[in-house]
Image: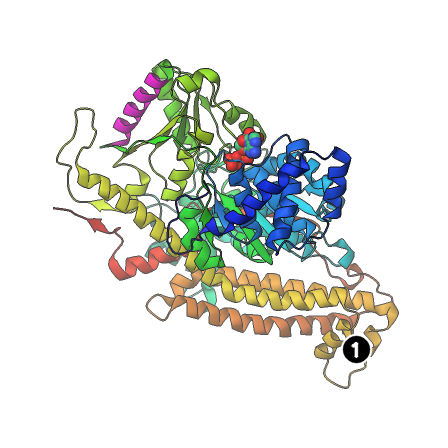
């Protein structure tokens, strides 16, 4: 029964080899049924620290865990769930369809890793799920004497610290990343939040390691005002389109023309703004121009309570804890005449992927892990296998219905929804953005269908709504993000009406995301159906292909029957996937050198915090041999201040280094176009600047300590100021593309003109 689809593809694993262990669990667990609760708990406690590398011990432990789950959670793991747990405990990633019970598998795997003495983080898709699962799993964990906690927004330092000391911690990868960033800023070792990363069980592993991998997590502090940027912004604000700058047709790019550059040069009193020395100013001017000419209030952002808040179309109307890359945010605040929030200074940052790579052991699960297997193998050396469904799946996936225009597509889709609704069938409509969801809901209302629209604003509220999406005749419109990880159960009447109909409006940029949406229907052997309504106006087509031909056969309602166009549509999606992958790789390459540098710096930092001998070593590099200063500053009464000064200047130097890198990255296309490999150029600059950083930090430390009075006991006494507050955020997708994206555009334009690849089939 455990023998099912095994696709021999790169990165896949055949999980059939674990079937004997599962059979052993099934045999053994029957015997535990007879034990009373006390005896079972005794048994669970006694298996503490089993050797799960041994198949026999693993089967024995899982048999106990299985019986504990039956009694304490009211769920006895299915055979397929045991197979998933064994596979994951053996380091494989598993592909399990939606609704097959990944949560329970996560409990078994987390407990299995924790009983062998590992510290386990279960990385959830959002805070709501982390809290929910930590609570739901705790009866099982406590039976094994394991502690369990969730780390979510709103917890203070002490609570977080305590939570991280649990054997099993539920959190999002963002929470962990932000806390790691906070740890790196600490001045006392005792402040540390996150113990060494050890084992990670990643829910929706492809979402974390592929979709969100390149999202930068940032910690910022209030920095010094930058008056020159404000005055540049004022000059740019007075500029006129067509006179000082040009906006391209799609309003995605804007550039100064000669008059604009001349005005800037006059204002700044420089001869040539494109000279190497002025890259910083030129970049700031470009950023101000973006804000001035392309960013629109109430489209890209709103102003509320004196603050600029981002509108993130794909995920929700107002995005919390998100800022644009720094200069752009301030530029918009200036444009709106708001107080420029303490010009944030990026103290440090890390990519989501870097957080994940910090774990010694990674395993994970997802409904679409197989679609990602090749990349999981390539990027993280993980092998992925398929878990069969508990009951045979009977969902019907209809072929796409392609229309000439988005309007025709939506009209046909809305008619389909009305018909399904009239027959009592629940329908879940997946859209690309909140705006699309709302537009579609209006079409439905025109047809007399009342729909619930989700906007990804509040995970807990959405969980409640999506959980009811399987009720008789329910109609729910949602973006891909909304209500993740929540089970949609069918109400009795809905089963008779054919189960849930999932209707996608336009395909996403990756087939994997389409597959995720389809997975909402037909869970656990339920009836269900999925279909995508697509059009030649869909972003996935227009952004990636130019089609120089007309379909041969089109129905009166605009439906395209020409088979070639289905292939073209799929081709567009593959082009999109390829571009994303390329972008991903480029971003990673831009971060590799910096990550190495950061590790070097953090090593020094950690040693200063934890190793009593480190200060002596450090100060030996600060003064030349023969100076008596190191001796003076390593005396017991002075050590603490000397350490703080050393840390302070290392941190300052790193912050400055990150600023330089950001400027170089922003400006790299301006510098290197037509010269050499931009990445190589970037790495050269980064490495040079990093070498200079160590020297600069040492010199500054020397300077401060040489000038210090005998009475100084704090940094403030020495005139040094640490950020008075810090905050964390994710860098939102820049509405004009990431740095790498823009960089590609420039290079692409130079190499082959600015058109996307044209396609013509004849
Ligand atoms: P997934 O995350 O894989 O989509 P969930 O973990 O949300 O699935 O589980 C889907 C539903 O199945 C939940 O309602 C859960 O309580 C139920 N379930 C999972 N495993 C079992 C089991 N072994 N016995 C009974 N119910 C189960």
In percent of width and height, residue 574 lies at: 31, 48
Residue 473, quarter of the rendered image:
top left
In percent of width and height, residue 687 lies at: 52, 71
> Is 135 left, or right, of 315 in this rendering?
right
Residue at (20, 32) in percent of width and height: 560
Asked whether residue 418 appears in the rendered view, the answer is yes
Residue at (32, 40) in percent of width and height: 539
**Number of disc labels:** 1
Furthest toward the bottom, the residue is 626
> Is 540 left, or right, of 314 in this rendering?
left
- The residue under label 1 is 630
Q: Is residue 129 above or below residue 86?
A: above
In percent of width and height, residue 371 lies at: 40, 47
Q: Is residue 406 above or below residue 289?
A: above
Residue at (25, 56) in percent of width and height: 753
In percent of width and height, residue 40 lies at: 73, 38
Specify start and end residues of the magenta stretch as a single range. 405-420
> Is 315 left, or right, of 569 in this rendering?
right
The quarter of the image holding the N terminus is top left
Front residue of this view, candidates 475 and 313: 475
Judge the density around disc 1: few (<14), some (14-19), many (≥20) Cα neighbours within 10 Å.
many
Front residue of this view, candidates 317 and 215: 215
């Amino acid at each position: 029964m455990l023998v099912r689809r095994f696709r021999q593809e790169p990165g896949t694993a055949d999980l059939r080899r674990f079937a004997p262990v599962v059979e052993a669990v099934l045999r053994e667990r029957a015997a535990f049924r007879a034990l009373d609760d006390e005896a079972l708990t005794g048994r669970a406690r006694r298996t503490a620290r089993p050797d799960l590398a041994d198949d026999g011990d693993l089967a024995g432990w899982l048999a106990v865990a299985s019986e504990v789950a039956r009694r304490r959670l009211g769920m006895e793991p299915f055979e397929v769930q045991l197979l998933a747990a064994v596979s994951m405990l053996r380091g494989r990633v598993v592909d399990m369809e939606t609704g097959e019970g990944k949560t329970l598998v996560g409990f078994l795997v987390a407990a299995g890793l924790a009983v062998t003495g590992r510290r386990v983080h279960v990385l959830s898709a959002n805070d709501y799920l982390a809290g929910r699962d930590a609570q739901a799993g705790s009866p099982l964990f406590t039976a094994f004497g394991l502690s369990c906690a969730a780390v979510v927004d709103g917890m203070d330092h002490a609570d977080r610290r305590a939570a991280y000391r649990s054997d099993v911690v539920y959190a999002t990868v963002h929470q962990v990343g932000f806390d790691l960033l906070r740890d790196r800023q600490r001045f006392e070792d005792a402040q540390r939040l996150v113990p060494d990363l050890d084992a990670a069980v990643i829910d929706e592993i492809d979402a974390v390691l592929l979709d969100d991998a390149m999202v930068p997590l940032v910690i910022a502090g209030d920095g010094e005002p930058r008056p020159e940027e404000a005055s540049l912004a004022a000059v740019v604000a007075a500029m006129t389109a067509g006179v000082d700058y040009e906006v391209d047709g799609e309003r995605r790019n804007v550039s100064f023309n000669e008059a604009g550059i001349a005005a800037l040069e006059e204002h700044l009193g420089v001869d040539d703004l494109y000279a190497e020395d002025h890259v910083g100013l030129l970049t700031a001017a470009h950023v101000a121009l973006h804000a001035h000419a392309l960013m629109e209030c109430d489209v890209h952002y709103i102003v509320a309570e004196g603050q600029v808040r981002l509108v993130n179309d794909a995920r929700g109307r107002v995005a919390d804890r998100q800022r644009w890359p720094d200069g752009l945010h301030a530029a918009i605040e200036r444009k709106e005449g708001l107080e420029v929030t303490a010009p944030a200074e990026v103290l440090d940052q890390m990519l989501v992927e870097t957080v994940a790579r910090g774990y010694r052991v990674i395993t994970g699960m997802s409904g679409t892990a197989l679609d990602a297997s090749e990349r999981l193998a390539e990027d993280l050396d993980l092998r992925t296998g398929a878990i069969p469904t508990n009951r045979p799946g009977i969902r019907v996936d209809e072929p796409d219905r392609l229309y000439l225009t988005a309007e025709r597509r939506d009209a046909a889709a809305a008619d389909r929804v009305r018909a399904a609704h009239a027959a009592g069938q629940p329908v879940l409509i997946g859209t690309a953005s909140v705006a699309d969801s709302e537009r579609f809901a209006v079409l439905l209302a025109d047809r007399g269908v009342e729909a619930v629209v989700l906007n990804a604003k509040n995970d807990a509220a959405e969980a409640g709504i999506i959980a009811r999406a399987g009720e008789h005749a329910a109609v729910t419109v949602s973006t891909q993000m909304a209500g993740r990880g929540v089970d949609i159960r069918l109400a009795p009447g809905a089963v008779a009406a054919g189960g849930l109909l999932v209707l996608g409006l336009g395909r996403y940029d990756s087939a994997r995301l389409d597959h995720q949406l389809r997975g909402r229907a037909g869970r656990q052997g339920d009836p269900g159906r999925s279909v995508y309504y697509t059009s030649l106006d869909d972003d996935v087509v227009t952004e990636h292909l130019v089609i120089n031909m007309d379909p041969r056969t089109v129905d009166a309602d605009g439906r395209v029957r020409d088979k070639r166009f289905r292939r073209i549509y799929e081709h567009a999606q593959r082009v999109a996937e390829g571009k994303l992958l390329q972008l991903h790789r480029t971003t990673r390459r831009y971060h590799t050198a910096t990550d190495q540098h950061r590790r070097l710096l953090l090593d020094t930092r950690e040693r200063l915090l934890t190793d009593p001998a480190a200060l002596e070593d450090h100060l030996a590099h600060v003064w030349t041999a023969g100076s008596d200063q190191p001796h003076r500053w390593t005396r017991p009464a002075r050590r603490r201040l000397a350490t703080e000064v050393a840390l302070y200047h290392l941190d300052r130097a790193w912050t400055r280094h990150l600023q330089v890198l950001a400027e170089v990255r922003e400006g790299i296309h301006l510098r290197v176009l037509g010269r050499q490999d931009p990445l190589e150029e970037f790495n050269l600059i980064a490495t040079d600047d990093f070498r200079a950083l160590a020297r600069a930090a040492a010199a500054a430390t020397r300077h401060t300590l040489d000038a210090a009075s005998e009475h100084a006991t704090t940094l403030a006494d020495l005139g040094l100021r640490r950020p008075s507050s810090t905050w964390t955020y994710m860098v939102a997708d820049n509405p004009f593309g990431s740095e790498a994206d823009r960089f590609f555009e420039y290079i692409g334009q130079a190499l082959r003109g600015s058109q996307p690849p044209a396609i013509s089939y004849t």
